[in-house]
Image: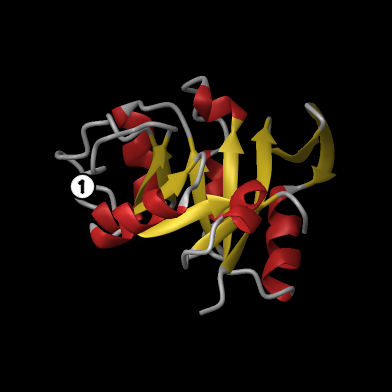
Amino acid sequence: MDRLRIPLIYLKDKQAFSRKAGFFRMIGKPIDLAREFKASGYELIHIVDQDAISGLTKNLDVYDGLTYIINVQVECAPDEKLVHKLLTLRCRVVLPPSFDVSPLHEKRLLVAKIPKDYTGDAEGFHDVVLEDATDSEIRRFAALGKRVIIYDKDEKKVEETVWGVITSSF
């Protein structure tokens, strides 16, 4: 099974950035990038929203436009109102596994970002992103029925099948 390639971008003040060696470099307008990604065959973009991580909602109009072009998953602050707004726009939302997802109805759009040494089962989340992937962690979450996403830094060290790989090389 082919692994879904998922480009990683950072969003701040309605602009898209890449991150290399700890430095952010502007790479353009998110809508233009989404069109390029779609044309190149990508199906999903992983976005770390620097504004939404601070609890700000200033990029919601960007997501409204992006979701008409391509699927997006957004890392944001674990704020119930912000999460609800993103879900309303049909964004996949990446949250810590400790976030209470019970009041949310769109479970298929919820993604748990799993830190190293997490022992829970990410109940209520549809997919998981493993921060530090190992074969045993991939097997554990796959057995729970979760689609597993890893970062490209871990891709060569695991043999288990995963659903997707988040990559900063696109």
Q: Is residue 112 above or below residue 77?
A: below
Q: Is residue 12 above or below residue 165?
A: above
Depth check: give the residue in front, 119 or 83.
119
The residue most toward the top is 54
In percent of width and height, residue 43 lies at 57, 69
Report which quarter residue 22 is drawn in. top right
Q: Amino acid at mark 1?
A: Gly
Q: Examine the rendered structure and indicate whether residue 42 appears above or below residue 157.
A: below
Residue position marked by numbered label 1 in the rendering = 124
Percent position of residue 156, x then y: 65, 57
From what the image shows, is residue 59 above or below residue 130?
above
Q: Residue furthest left?
A: 102
Q: Is residue 27 visible?
A: yes
Identify the coloring: secondary structure
Residue 158: x and y in percent read 55, 57
Point 68% across, 60% down: residue: 34
The number of numbered badges drawn on the structure is 1
Residue 42: x %, y % from top left: 64, 69
Tell me the quadrant of the picture where the C terminus can be found.
bottom right
Q: Is residue 2 left or right of residue 101?
A: right
Q: Among all residues in the image, which is located at the extreme bottom?
A: 1
Q: Residue at x 15, y 40 (%)?
A: 102
- Asked which secondary structure carries label 1, the reply is loop
